[in-house]
Image (cartoon, grey):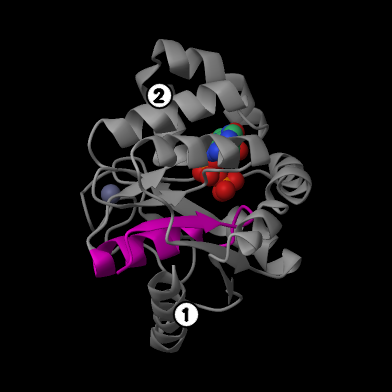
Amino acid sequence: MVKRLILTGAPGSGKGTWSKILSDTFSLPHISSGDLFRKELADDSPLGQQVRSYVEQGALVPDELTIKLVEKTLAEGPGQNGFILDGFPRTIAQALALDGILAATGVKLDAVIALDVDEAILVERALSRMICRGCGQPYNTSVTRPNQEGVCDRCGGEVVRRSDDTQETLQRRLLLYHEQTKPLADYYRDQGILVKLENNGPPDQTVQQELFQMLESTCSGA
Ligand code: ADP
Ligand code: ZN
């Protein structure tokens, strides 16, 4: 049974898109650390003010603040009976903290999906993507535009370009991904829960079946 999943990958690798598919398929709440931060920024909350410069410049928010926010979100309910965590953990320190948080409630991760995408495709995707301010649904400026310009098909929210999706910020985020986040694959491979998905194309039925099968065998083996 698929219950506690992590989606990890570079910016533009499709974490948001796959999270939505998996969240619909397995009826699990989608918890995106990037969406959580963007919400704090939009509300201009005290946390939002603290993290604004990191997010806008494409730097990582310090582990302590990030861990606290995710821990609070998991504890508030959406994480009680399973979850899809998108964009967290992004550092080994965050992964260790998450293991501790889960161990304290007697549960563990079922699988970690690492999305693998060619660098050229990552850049193209990140620079053409849009996102719903309301629900985080990803769109792009070419194939997956919303039916009505600027309006989310799912929730009616405003569909915008992300202010951190610029050429310069993206280079910084890619670098940080290689330095800090990519090593997580080894960490989870050692735990026997890593599922690697090559994600250079669209998330069509064939790729979905491939992923569901890999998940089934990983999760039942855990
Ligand atoms: P991306 O498309 O770059 O994967 P996200 O929406 O996941 O974007 O994150 C956007 C920004 O939010 C990041 O560039 C970073 O500033 C901040 N952020 C999100 N998740 C984390 C995390 N786990 N640790 C530190 N910073 C984070
Ligand atoms: Zn929406």
Residue wearing tag 1: 214
Queried whether the magenta region covers residue 4, the answer comes back as: yes
Residue 145: image quadrant is bottom left
Q: Amino acid at mark 1?
A: Met
Magenta span: 1-26
Residue 64 in the image: above or below residue 142: above
Residue 216 in the image: above or below residue 155: below
Queried whether the magenta region covers residue 183, the answer comes back as: no
**Image quadrant in which the N terminus is located:** bottom left
Instruction: Residue 44: give x, y in percent of width and height.
Output: 40, 16
State the residue at coordinates (26%, 66%). 26
Residue 124: image quadrant is bottom right
State the residue at coordinates (46%, 73%). 218
Residue wearing tag 2: 40
Instruction: Residue 22: give x, y in percent of width and height.
Output: 34, 66
Q: Residues within 10 Å of mark 1 (few under 14, many from 20)?
A: some
State the residue at coordinates (43%, 10%). 46
- Left or right position of 57 against 77: right
State the residue at coordinates (43%, 80%). 217
Q: Is residue 139 visible in the rendered structure shown here?
A: no
Q: Nearer the viewer, residue 69 or 129?
A: 69
Q: SS of the residue at dot 2?
A: helix
Residue 39 in the image: above or below residue 7: above
